[in-house]
Image (tube, grey):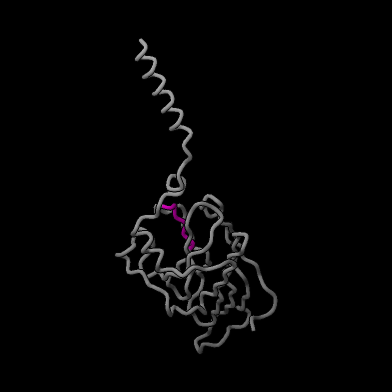
Amino acid sequence: MKYLIIILSVLVFACQTNSDKPISDETKFPKVNDEFTLYLSSFSKKQLPIVIKGCNISSDGLKQFDGKQFSKYTDEYSLAYGQIPVNGNYIATITLASADCYLPVLTTYNLKGQIIDKKGIAIGGCGADCGFTCEEFMTLRKDFTFYASDTISTYTCDSLGSETPGTYEYYIIYKEGKLRSDGTIEMSEEVKKKLPGRKE
């Protein structure tokens, strides 16, 4: 009986000691796997605020993904624009999707490299039609809110490529959103607003 009491006392003490151990950094912040680390090394580290004018940006020095390596993290032909600081326990990158203008895509990952959320933070209305001009714009602010817009000037062309009277339109399409602390991306619907005058 005496030996049983001693054994039980040792077990109780061991359990209490174990439960009082502090949680390690590795438990709270799992290490990023090697493949994900290699993927992130393709991005330069950016500071907020960020402004991207998709029709005026150069791809020089930006890595293009081939759709084979890192296919679980990003899309084929996208460009590595930058890794951004975050407001929570996750990782966020901006890639540029190729179109008539480069379109920023915001992607968030957990620390194991699994995608939490992914959204295009652009309007993407640009084209090369006669009489059509556009201006893609995006800003991601220090408070993790963002604004994306496309300012459009358009008219119908006649058979000679001249403006058909009465067909001119000048407007902006925009949407707003926020990067939340859990890594999810909040985004509004697109809003279209008529602008006065003509685009200069």
Decide which of 2, 62 is in the foreground and name it. 2
Which image quarter is the C terminus in? bottom right
In the rendered image, the residue lying farthest to the right is 196
Residue 62 x %, y % = 42, 75
Magenta residue span: 106-111
Magenta: main secondary structure: strand
> What residue is drawn where x is 45% and y is 31%?
17
Decide which of 17, 149 is in the foreground and name it. 17
Residue 135 x %, y % = 56, 76
In the rendered image, the residue lying farthest to the bottom is 160
In the rendered image, the residue lying farthest to the left is 68
Total marks placed: 0
Left or right, residue 40 beside residue 54: left
Looking at the image, is 177 positioned above or below residue 127? above
In the rendered image, the residue lying farthest to the top is 1
Looking at the image, is 33 positioned above or below residue 56? above
Residue 8 x %, y % = 39, 19
Residue 125 x %, y % = 51, 70
Left or right, residue 112 beside residue 130: left
> What residue is drawn where x is 58% and y is 65%?
140
Whether residue 65 appears in magenta in the rendering, the answer is no
Decide which of 158, 9 is in the foreground and name it. 9
> What residue is drawn where x is 56% and y is 51%?
181
Which image quarter is the N terminus in? top left
Decide which of 126, 67 is in the foreground and name it. 67
